[in-house]
Amino acid sequence: MILKVTGIVIAILSFILLFMGAQLVAAGGSPAYSIIALVLLATATLIFLKKKSALTLYALLMWGILIWIIYEVGFDKWQWIPRGDLFALIGLWLALPWVVRPLYQAGSSFDNRRFHPFLGSTLGVMLVIVVALMFHDPYPLQGQISNATPTRSAESAGKDWAAYGGTTAGQRFSSLDQRV
């Protein structure tokens, strides 16, 4: 039952992604989403047919997505999220024991594995890459911070405030002669 629901959900997501990917291609964009959707649909079909090769195909898809993300945006971690978050969640779901075990038992009643080595190691490597990217800044700020203290403005607000806060320095206090 869990495999049928998983296969149906992934198939629905792949049809949505295929439709949106076709719109992107029609607008002159990248065909990557359409290709990913087709491989995702093949994965959903294999899951629905209870073939353990679905997990291998999905692991290969994740590697392809990683290569595509690096090609498109480099190592900018914030741009990885919209391109890879859904596929990472699907990969985590497919790596869970209650999804892996029925796929292996369908091929052989004696095979009771709870872990798919290729998909699991793919997810592990992807996790290490994402954690490493947390410490990489793709847009470092160049420059220096001055330690000099600003000098006090020569202009005084007096009775006529020409700027917000009394002076162009934005100091929010009034002159003593304005207090009642």
Image (cartoon, rainbow, N blue to C red):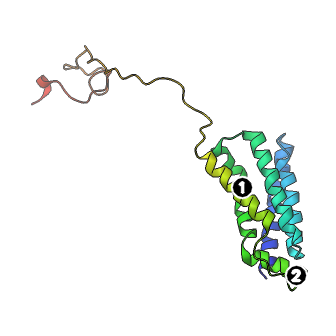
Residue 177 lies, with reference to residue 155, above or below; the image says: below
Nearer the observer: mark 1 or 2; the answer is: 1
Residue at 31 percent of width and 20 percent of height: 150
Amino acid type of the residue tagged 1 in the rendering: Val
Amino acid type of the residue tagged 2 in the rendering: Ala
Compute the Cα span from label 1 to label 2.
28 Å
On the image, the x and y values in percent for residue 54 come to 86, 68
Give residue 106's mark. Answer: 2
Q: Is residue 149 visible?
A: yes
* Residue at disc 2, secondary structure: helix
Residue 57 lies, with reference to residue 75, above or below; the image says: below
On the image, the x and y values in percent for residue 74 come to 72, 39
Q: Residues within 10 Å of mark 1 (few under 14, many from 20)?
A: few
Q: Earlier in the sequence, mark 1 or mark 2?
A: 2
Residue at 76 percent of width and 69 percent of height: 94
On the image, the x and y values in percent for residue 61 come to 83, 56
Q: Is residue 5 visible?
A: no
Residue to which mark 1 is pinned: 125
- Nearer-the-camera pick, 164 or 36: 36
Residue at 27 percent of width and 27 percent of height: 171
